[in-house]
Structures are given as C-alpha cells and as structure tokens.
Image (spheres, rainbow, N blue to C red):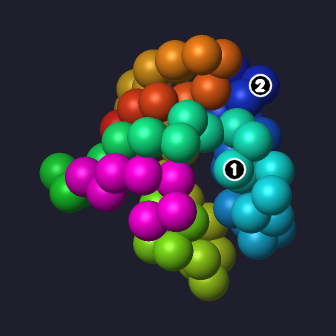
Amino acid sequence: MDNTVSAILRAVDADDWTSFANLVHPYVHWTEDGITTRGRTRVMALLSGREGVRPPDSYEFRDGRVYRWNA
C-alpha cells in the first residue's frame, strides 16, 4: 500500500483533519459502496466521527495528492 494511502487511513483514525486535508486533492472523488462524495470538505464531513475507513481497492493521484478513492 502506498505511504500516502496509509497516512490517510491513520489521519482518519486519529481525527487529524489537517493532515487529511494535506493528503487529498481539493476535488477528491471518494467512493464507498458505489456512492461517491466529491470535494475535500464534504469527504471530511462524511468521515468525521468514524472509527476508520476501509482501505481502497484502487486510488488515483493528481498533483501529488489522492484524487480518487474507491473502496
């Protein structure tokens, strides 16, 4: 697994949204169970309070940050 993906998983577990924001693209496409949420702020709201997220089946980078997350 890519170091950035591992860092995203740790950031969500720790509720470290500053780190999370630095690791994902502002226009991130976050897909879980076929439902896509777009935009870093919306994704942070979606994930806030969760005990963690599933590692992605696939992901894509843009400008050095995760742009697409498919779990």
Is 30 positioned to the left or the right of 15 in the image?
left
Does residue 18 belong to the magenta stretch? no
Instruction: Name the residue at 59% across, 77% down.
Output: 48
Is 24 positioned to the left or the right of 4 in the image?
left
The picture places residue 50, in percent across and down from the top left corner, at 58, 77
Give the vertical position of 58 relative to 51 (above or below).
above
Q: Image quadrant for the N terminus?
A: top right
Three-letter residue code for mark 1: Ala
Instruction: Name the residue at 42% across, 52% down.
Output: 39
The picture places residue 16, in percent across and down from the top left corner, at 81, 64
Is 30 positioned to the left or the right of 13 in the image?
left
Q: Is residue 6 visible?
A: yes
Exactly how many numbered labels are in the figure?
Answer: 2
Is 65 positioned to the left or the right of 3 in the image?
left
Question: How crowded is the residue under tag 1: few (<14 C-alpha within 10 Å), some, or many (20+)?
Answer: some
Instruction: Name the residue at 52% across, 17% down.
Output: 62
Three-letter residue code for mark 2: Asn
Identify residue for label 2: 3
What is the residue that sits farthest to the left in this orientation?
34
Identify which residue, 51 or 40, lies in the foreground: 40
The picture places residue 27, in percent across and down from the top left corner, at 43, 40
Q: Image quadrant for the C terminus?
A: top left
Identify residue for label 1: 21
Q: What span is colored magenta in the figure?
A: 36-42
- Mark 2–mark 1 CB contact (< 8 Å): no
Mark 2 or mark 1, whichever is nearer to me = 1
Instruction: Name the residue at 44% across, 41% down.
Output: 28
Q: Tag 2's secondary structure?
A: helix
Q: Quadrant of residue 5?
A: top right
